[in-house]
Image (cartoon, grey):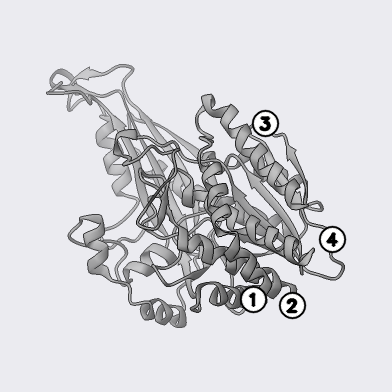
Amino acid sequence: MSTIDEYLQVNAGRREDELFELLRIPSISADPGSRPAIRRAADWLLEHFIKMGLAAELISTKGHPLVLAESPHVAGAPTVLVYGHYDVQPPEPLDKWTTPPFEPTIRDGAVYARGAADDKGQVLTHMKSVEAWLDVEGGLPVNLKFLIEGEEEVGSANLEEFVRQNTKRLACDCVVVSDSCQFSPGRPAITCGLRGIVYYELRLRGPKRDLHSGSFGGSVANPANALTRMLSALIDERGRIQVPGFYDDAVPLADEERRQFADLQFDDRAYLEELDIDAVAGEEGYTTLERRWARPTFDICGLTSGYQGEGAKTILPSTASAKLSFRLVPDQDPEKITAGLKKILADVCPPGIRMELIDFQGSPGLMVSPENPYVRAAARAIEYGFGTPPVYIREGGSIPVVSTFAQSLGADILLLGWGQNDDNTHSPNEKFSLADFHRATRASAKLWEELGKVQ
């Protein structure tokens, strides 16, 4: 590795320049007007893979193209699939950016730009580590496949279909995903658990039009009133979700993992200050980290009903709606949760109100044992690259395509996030530490060596 380390050090400036090139491309998947930029980003990746010596192609989908690349075959070596995405979130609100979102700017050792941490910078660490191996050694100790999509920020619908239809082409021993965070500055992490998700929109309809609340109030069911009562029935004052059968299959937190979380010494006071709140909340009997990472939750993500303008307007609204999400822990079944939700909502929906529940998406949670040989190999690589061993954490968010990889390919999952929790992903002033960018590239280069030893 000494020669590869030297190569990475000599070429550090060029890697940053190439990162900035990619960050200048406004590949916003949610914006139809950005389709040319999306294609430029895909082409940029394609050209770099080919220049590195990988067999690469663009794969058309009903939406934005996939970039698929593969290294020269190494007989008897493990096969690793690296997943990432080249699309980014919309940059709005633009007035909150200190510098323009697609003009990479270095401040305090970090590059500020949309996509810096989510996910262009993290994807590039793996590409550049492979380039180092091929330029220095002429080959790799593993078989590598890259699958980089352009629709992660809008749901990955076409990627999931591609994965399910191309299991032989994508066959691998493990999948590497770097689209998350370290535990804190100077404390790299391996994520061993993801929560799943189910997401719905609940629509209620009462009278055929808005009514005068004085003339009709008290004699006609009010959809807004009904909505608040129905939503409050889904969770009790102790933070326990009331959907029938909701906790039946939920894997409980083991005592050992609770001790591991406690050893991380999470600072609740700093958490409150960062969010400008005066108290934490959630299910009774659990710490903040346990609630965020390893317990199921219910959240109202949006509410709509009645008059929203300035001043007063005395109406009884004809409709009301809410967007709802449940985060799930391993073994909870999205379909079972949906069935239970339909039952409780039907039970509490009052007369005079017609209800519609729209099911948007469902994905189960995921767990990977820290004792998994691929996880142990990744731990050695991270310690080499960052100079300290990683901690083992969970992630409260959901990456549905990761479950698709695990289920469709039967592969182990390595969630190796290089970012930080304050990188402002999805927010103005997104950033990525350049020191972490280089440390992660070094760790990635070591990762291929360590994974190559796994039998």
The percent position of residue 2, horizontal first and vertical second, equals 65, 75
Judging by the rendered image, the residue that carries numbered circle 4 is 73
Q: Nearer the viewer, mark 4 or mark 3?
A: 4
Residue at x 51% of width, y 45% of height: 20
Q: Which residue is mark 2?
A: 453
In the rendered image, residue 92, in percent from the top left (x then y), is placed at 37, 35
Residue nearest the viewer, comparing 124 with 145: 124
Q: Which residue is mark 1?
A: 377
Amino acid type, mark 4: His
How far apart marks 2 and 3 lie (CA) works out to: 39 Å
Contact? badges 1 and 2 (CB < 8 Å): yes
Q: CA distance from mark 4 to mark 3?
A: 30 Å
Q: Quadrant of the N terminus?
A: bottom right
Res 158 → quadrant: top right
CA gap, disc 1 and disc 2: 8 Å
Above or below for 440 versus 227? below
Q: Nearer the viewer, mark 4 or mark 1?
A: 4
Residue 453 occupies which quadrant of the picture?
Answer: bottom right
